[in-house]
Image (cartoon, rainbow, N blue to C red):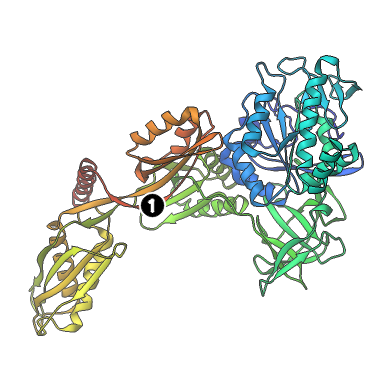
Amino acid sequence: MLHRMGVVTRMGSVEEGSTVSDFRPDEIQRQISIATTLVVGEHKGIKMNLLDTPGFTDFIGEVKCAVRVADVVGVLIHAGGGIEVGTEIVWGFADELNLPRFVFVNQLDREHVNFDRVVDSLKEAYTSVAPIAIPVNPGNDGFNAIIDLLSMKVVTYNPDGTEKGRSEIPADMKATADEWRQKLVESVSETDDQLMEKFFENDGLSQEDLMSGLRKGFREGLIYPLLCGNAKKQVGTLMLLDFLRDIAPSPLDKGIVIAKHEGTLEEVKLPCDGNAPFAGLVFKTVSDKHIGDLSLFRVYSGCIQSGDEVRNSSRGHPEKIGGVFISCGKNRKNIDDICAGDLGALVKLKDTHTNDTLCATKDPLILAPIIFPAPVTRSAIEAKNKGDEEKVSSGLHILEEEDPSFHFSFDTEMSQLIIEGQGEMQLTVILERLKERSGVEVDLVKPLIPYRETIKSTSEAQGKHKKQSGGRGQFGDCWLKLEPSIEKGKELEFVDAIVGGVIPGKFLPAIEKGIRSTLDEGVVGGFKVIDVKVTCYDGSYHTVDSSEAAFKIAGSLGFKKAFKEAKPVILEPIYNLEVRVPEQYMGDVMGDVSSRRGKVMGMDREGRFQVIKAKVPLAELDKYSATLRSLTGGRGIHTASFSHYEEVPGDIQKKLVDAYEARRAAGSD
């Protein structure tokens, strides 16, 4: 598209690393898109902002950024592969924002492609898909012609992508073309009652009604036009550009955008008007080692220019605008201003990041944020060099600001730094950037599992602490009864059942404190204790030697003794796993889930895909996204969320207890 618009003089190549949008070193090395890139061109007097997004599901957060600020979504379909899981995801994102979308069936020069079958599958999945172009000679290297169903002409392309000419449809294809045209007319007429009446009255639609109906139906999301071609050879590229210019909505067609007042949160209607108060959304932050952070943004109302004072209403502070740029890949051009409906870039902002709203200081508004997908994979990291921990943390914070689909946190319970994201490749890229920008290296380590301990039966034990070593001694004595807590989810339910003052009331909090100090340490495996009811029902004290410290120790001793006699068990976190895969991979995926001690809870069909729902121990989900990608050729996706705790099998409990005892023995040595 950029070549056809004259932005570049020669076609770039992914294999050669010379494309405009995949210009970053990690993208060139892997030969895939990793980040969303804004590119700009002009076709027949109309400026077009194009957002090139990754297709790899690890970088789906980048797609979310682009969809949020787009007016139209174009979904590319491989003519040989058809609908993939990624197609479903992007379609769902567009559904969330009710955006118009079109389909482009690409690579029609590949052998054995079946255009009709691809269209049928799209219609089955999305109902209102309507081809406005069909290929003439697909499935061979010489593919170079398309029938434009709007003009009912054959468009033939030269090897350089220019139009060779438009001709009448050959006799041997006329019946097929007429059939496709009739389907298109029917699809358009179904989008509007008046058009439907005209269709029945006149046994069709006039060319004017067809074009206006297509334009209106597309913009209202009632019809999804389908185009086709071969991008590398630029077959169909000009037709696509004409479609975007003549049929697709402009920002003005989008109309009113809803924002909220920063203070009252009342809804405010923003017109796409350069004379209105300024409001824009930063949808992506790019770190550039030469100029610092580059903020890509869309203007929804008003204009912004260099030197303006604006407000970051998301963070509640002012910003001074330095340079205002048009961005095209890695190239930037300084301009005077950017107005409503346009996309651009800002540099050297003080504290503005992805998802922040910038607006006029007198009229502070907040635009709806990008809702990023929840993480599906996690890992733990350790700094290779001691003393680098602070650099690692600050570096990860910057990367999280750039890409909110990535998260990091310090797990205080496990004492591990945890990173989470959409897949192993995303995490690998994040750590490569951490090394490149911050100069620190980390090791990936397996995240520790937050097991829990509890009991299955009732027991009683005495906790007695008595010590005499000259001077005042220490004495604390309590009898404790342990039983499983009826109310699950509470760490401890402590009951004071002392009668007759056998233990003075002032010492009861110390006993409870001693018990609570043991909960975090664990008893049999070194894991946090939950769901235990403890009743202190008897004991004794010494008028001189008893103290809070002594009763705290007594409480801890009694709890440990009783816990070990109450059939202690170790619990593990169980996660809800939901896997969406094409049907042919279902058996392999279910077999793998079973091998991970998972329980398949059910299956649902969603279009061409099967959704497998299962409960799987967290301990078995390490690097699951890589395994799923391997099993499904990259066509499966999953989500995972915490469900509940469940008792671990006996053999695993023994291993955990033995490992704990070994650690304690090593520590005492």
Residue under the image location 81 percent in, 62 percent down: 271
Residue under the image location 35 percent in, 43 percent down: 619
Can residue 241 be seen at all in this image of the molecule? Answer: yes
Q: Nearer the viewer, residue 217 or 625?
A: 217
Q: Nearer the viewer, residue 316 or 594?
A: 594
Q: Vertical placement of 15 versus 140: above or below?
A: below
Q: Is residue 104 left or right of residue 615?
A: right
In the rendered image, residue 510, in percent from the top left (x then y), is placed at 21, 76
Q: Is residue 388 left or right of residue 529?
A: right
Residue 554 is drawn in which quadrant?
A: bottom left
Mark 1: which secondary structure? strand
Q: Given the image, on which type of amino acid does mark 1 rest?
A: Ser
Q: Vertical placement of 262 versus 114: above or below?
A: below
Q: Nearer the viewer, residue 582 or 479?
A: 582
Neighbour class for label 1 at 10 Å: few (<14), some, many (≥20)? some
In the rendered image, residue 62, in percent from the top left (x then y), is placed at 63, 45
Residue of label 1:
643
